[in-house]
Image: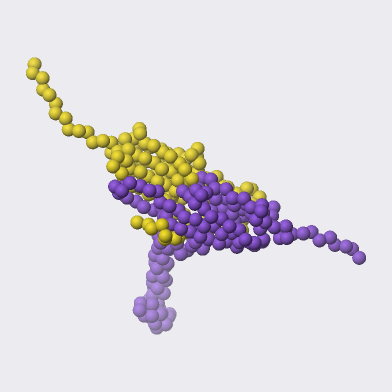
Amino acid sequence: MAETSKSLQAKEKRGPLSVAEQIDQGPTFTPDVDIFETDGNIVVVADMPGVTPENIDIDLRENTLTLSGKVSSPEGPDEVDILREYETGTYFRQFTLSEMIDQPHIDAKMTDGVLRLTLPKVKPVEPRKVKVKAE
Amino acid sequence: MYYKGGRAMIIKNSLDNLSRWRWDDTFEELERMRLEIERLYQYPAMKLFRGHSSGVFPAINITEENDIYYLRAELPGIKADDLGLSIANNTVTIEGERKSDPEDENTKYHRRERDAGRFSRKITLPAQIDESKADAKCSNGILTIVLPKAESAKPKKIAITAV
């Protein structure tokens, strides 16, 4: 879809998707995600720059997947702003998973501020014939 | 059309109670329009025009401390090898390419929000930079460039002699 010769446009960081989501102090942002499906997995890739693997919280309960990443302000206390084009804050996004995910085997990797979640799809149960024993 | 009629009505019935109702009615419509426009501002499309970013990728923050400039940019998924950085006098040029991850042929996209492509941005700083002391780090998708001011740009104290 995107050719590599196209040049990138700056995007404003998106605020929380709903007002109910602002639980932490400081601004909350919605990370951009790509969601795609391969043969055996659903993959979620989320842009969360400034989040280290230790600061990320992936929560899965009742088919709701919650991604939450804290970003500490990188500026020192004595630094004076000259130009400010983006704010830093917590990243938060929630997804509803279908029951077709093998939840105990979800894999998460974080590199260069990008989280890659691999959600394996449950293999459909093969139809089986049940043998009847004669008593 | 409505407002022109409204104004004419106001002039005609200026002392009438009815005219007050007309005046409020006009304002009510304006108020509704204002709320509608404000609601439009919620949409991400409108936000693109309103943002204080110059619209060029990447968005940067520049801060200063003790004669050193710190320039930070959020570049998720971009490794140090994909970036080119050059400094001349008081300008910094950041350029590079954000590649999309190569995926299998039979992947179906359900959602695609992350962009890929080339970028190039030239930033002019308020003072000259000492390039030999500049340093750049890229970690967790955040690029931090430390740019100390050149000696000639640092403020010098001038002694005042009392005569």
Q: Say which quadrant the N terminus of chain B sits in.
A: bottom left
Furthest-left residue in this view: A134
Q: How many marks on residues?
A: 0
Q: Position of residue B17 (x, y in %)?
A: 40, 75
- Is residue B93 positioned above or below A72 on the image? below
Residue at the location (56% across, 53% down)? B72
**Depth order, front residue of B116/A75:** B116
Is residue B40 rendered to the left or right of residue B152? left
Is residue B163 rendered to the left or right of residue A35? right
Q: Position of residue A78 (x, y in %)?
A: 66, 50
**Depth order, front residue of B55/A71:** B55
Is residue B65 rendered to the left or right of residue B4? right
Residue at the location (69% across, 55% down)? B67
Q: Say which quadrant the C terminus of chain B sits in.
A: bottom right
Q: How is the image coloured?
A: by chain
**Can see residue B33?**
yes
- Is residue B97 positioned above or below B21 on the image? above
Q: Position of residue A73 (x, y in %)?
A: 56, 47
- The chain letter of the yellow chain reads A
Residue at the location (35% across, 43% down)? A43
Q: Colour of chain B?
A: purple
Is residue B6 rendered to the left or right of residue B130? left
Q: Position of residue A23 (x, y in %)?
A: 47, 44
**Depth order, front residue of A91/B73:** B73
**Can see residue B24?**
no
Furthest-right residue in this view: B163
- Is residue A83 positioned above or below A122 on the image? below
Residue at the location (33% across, 46% down)? B104
